[in-house]
Amino acid sequence: MQQANASSNLLVLGTAQDGGYPHTGCSEDCCREAWKDSNQKRLIASLAVLDGKDCFLVDITPDFKYQLQLIEHHINDKPRISGICITHAHLGHYMGLLELGLEVMNTNDIPVYVMPKMKSFLENNAPFTQLLELNNIRLLALQDNYPIDIFKDVKITPFQVPHRNEYSETVGYRIQSSHQSVLYIPDIDSWDGWDTDINQLIKESDIALLDGTFYDKTELKNRDVSAIPHPSIRESIKQFSTLDKMDRKKVNFTHLNHTNNVLREGSEARKDVIQQGFQIAYDGMVISI
Ligand SMILES: [Zn+2]
Ligand SMILES: [Zn+2]
Ligand SMILES: [Zn+2]
């Protein structure tokens, strides 16, 4: 995972589902400790690819203010946001765009790369239209499976995945340098409903940050789980069971819902995931690419 001469780093800015951890409005056991102890909290899932002071974001979350601090702390300098790729139009993945507007950072001409439906969604809906009118951001259209260069030696490729697409397509990304290939799929409805073989993709990657929203579908007590489809970690482990030890170790579960017991140190769920050879991503995790 670590490359001695790598010039770019990938910093994991957050590993929680769209509502964060602790989760808005939750006073149940799952969030009780995290409300009291800020060391246990997790920010909403997103990534930063870093090259010197330059920083390219994959998703921009409602936790962006803290995530920008995380980057500053990591590079010990003020980052320059060189671009942003967005996965889809669900709250946790793009609402941080509003922080770039007049009321807050008032940025200038930041390239935001999006798929065509997402582009037209942002172009046609306030308050995002204001970001465009004031030139805070500039939208650039991505094409399924077409890479774009983000740094001299790093490119990123979107690929569509099945997900509840009310306002936009949903994509995962492959971030690739000459050293490393990182797979990022924070949201997907199911592995079986996808025409791509996820096991093959994991084999071709060096590390894979994958949708681990729920450990088990029974953990959701007050919501209809069929309305928010995700592969549970238990289902994913079954899906990935043919992978050898090396390939299993590449899998890091992310986008963790507050109800997911893998968030809790010492839980049976966490032990199970680790024992079966998989990993759980964490905020501040660094991957040399
Ligand atoms: Zn999400
Ligand atoms: Zn909770
Ligand atoms: Zn989503």
Image (cartoon, rainbow, N blue to C red):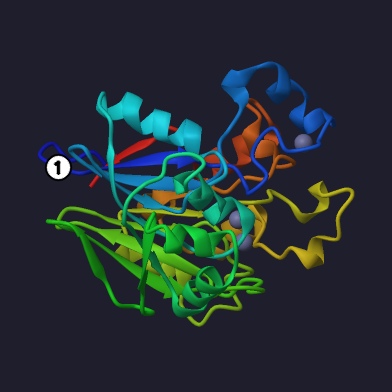
Decide: is 239 above or below 6. Answer: below
**Ligand 3 image-quadrant field:** bottom right
Quadrant, the N terminus: top left
* Residue plotted at (27% across, 72% down): 147
Q: Residues within 10 Å of mark 1 (few under 14, many from 20)?
A: some
Q: Position of residue 149 (x, y in %)?
A: 20, 64
Q: Please, what is the three-letter code of the amino acid marked with disc 1?
A: Ala
Q: Residue at x 71, y 17 (%)?
A: 36
Instruction: Measuring from the top left, give residue 40's x and y in whole percent.
Output: 61, 24
x, y percentage for residue 115?
A: 44, 74
Q: Which residue is mark 1?
A: 6
Q: Is residue 61 visible?
A: yes
Residue projecting furthest to the top: 37
> Vertical placement of 216 versus 145: above or below?
above
Query: Where is residue 81 drawn, in percent x and y?
Result: 30, 46
Q: Is mark 1 within 8 Å of ligand 1?
A: no
